[in-house]
Image (spheres, rainbow, N blue to C red):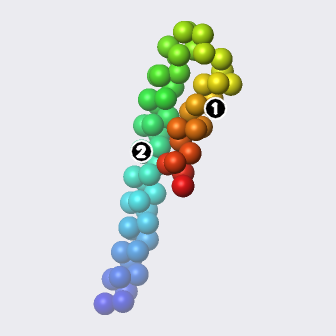
Amino acid sequence: MAGGCLTLIPLTVLTVVIGAGSTTALSVVERVREAGPLRADGIFRGRLTGALLLEAAPCTG
């Protein structure tokens, strides 16, 4: 019984890590697509970076 539980813990952790990684990767792809038009509209690189970091801050805890 304990051996089965000890096998499930690493599998659960692996599933969570893969899920979080894919979610983060998708978010980055979306942000890159949004950054192009904003830069073309004249937003400075530093201001855009600051806005993205400010938006991501609540997600990181």
> Which residue does the image show at 47% across and 39% down from the upper left?
25
Disc 2: which residue: 23
Residue that extends furthest to the left in the rendered view of this protein: 1
Residue 8 image offset from top left, x and y in percent: 36, 75
Residue 12 image offset from top left, x and y in percent: 38, 67
Give 22 or 46, whichever is nearer the viewer. 46
Number of residues whose C-alpha sits closer than 10 Å to that of mark 2, classed few (under 14), some (14–19) or many (20 or more): few
Residue that extends furthest to the bottom in the rendered view of this protein: 1
Quadrant location of the C terminus in the rendered image: bottom right
> Which residue does the image show at 56% across and 45% down from the upper left?
57
Number of residues whose C-alpha sits closer than 10 Å to that of mark 1, classed few (under 14), some (14–19) or many (20 or more): few
In space, the residues marked 2 and 1 are separated at their CA atoms by 21 Å
Disc 1: which residue: 50
Locate residue 35 relative to residue 26 in the image: left or right. right
Q: Look at label 2 and name its amino acid.
A: Thr
Q: Which mark is residue 59?
A: none
